[in-house]
Amino acid sequence: MTNIEKIIITANQLANKGKKPTVALIKANLVNPTPLPQIIAALKTWQHEPENCVMPEQETNTEDKKEESPTAPTLTMEDLNNALAPIQQELAEVKRLLQQLTKG
């Protein structure tokens, strides 16, 4: 399989996932290093050949979509407060230093 075929397959896979294939996305998804000019040329070819573009299936029922998608992690207020504590301490320190600078 040539590099161009691999690039086109990768572009189709990204399109199937609902993502717009870009040079960066394709480069990140290729297993072997591929020169950028080759990726760009293949992507231009892919864009001009709509039969290579496979559109993702449209969901007809939003409840089915919710059931299939992975659940988002549940954050509690304690989790949020723990995450914010260092930021709040740093902000207080910055304010203190700023006050020292403006007084001095």
Image (cartoon, rainbow, N blue to C red):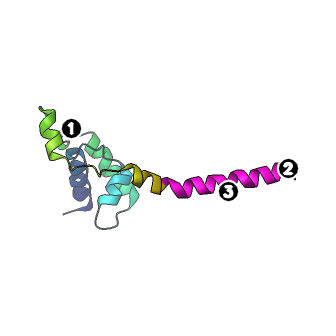
What residue do we see at 46% from left, 57% from top? 82
Frontmost of labels 3 and 1 is 3
Label 3 – label 1 distance at C-alpha: 57 Å
Q: Secondary structure at mark 2?
A: helix
Most distant residue in the bottom direction: 32
Q: Residue furthest top?
A: 60
Q: Quadrant of the N terminus?
A: bottom left
Question: Observer-nearest residue: 94 or 20?
Answer: 94
Q: Are marks 3 and 1 in contact (CB under 8 Å)?
A: no
In this rendering, position of residue 25 left or right of residue 99: left
The verdict on residue 79 being magenta is no
Local SS, label 1? helix
| Dot 1 crowding, Cα within 10 Å, few <14, some 14–19, many 20+ | few
User: In this orientation, does residue 83 appear?
Assistant: yes
**Callouts 1 and 2 close, C-beta under 8 Å:** no
- Crowd class of label 2 (few under 14; some 14 to 19; many from 20; radius 10 Å): few
For this rendering, which residue is in front, 71 or 65? Answer: 71
Q: CA distance from mark 3 to mark 2?
A: 15 Å
Identity of the amino acid at label 3? Glu
Q: Which residue is mark 1?
A: 50
Point 28% across, 66% down: residue: 31
Q: Quadrant of residue 94?
A: bottom right
Q: Residue 81: where, in percent of width, then height?
A: 46, 52
Q: Which residue is mark 2?
A: 103
Q: Is 94 included in the stretch rendered in magenta? A: yes
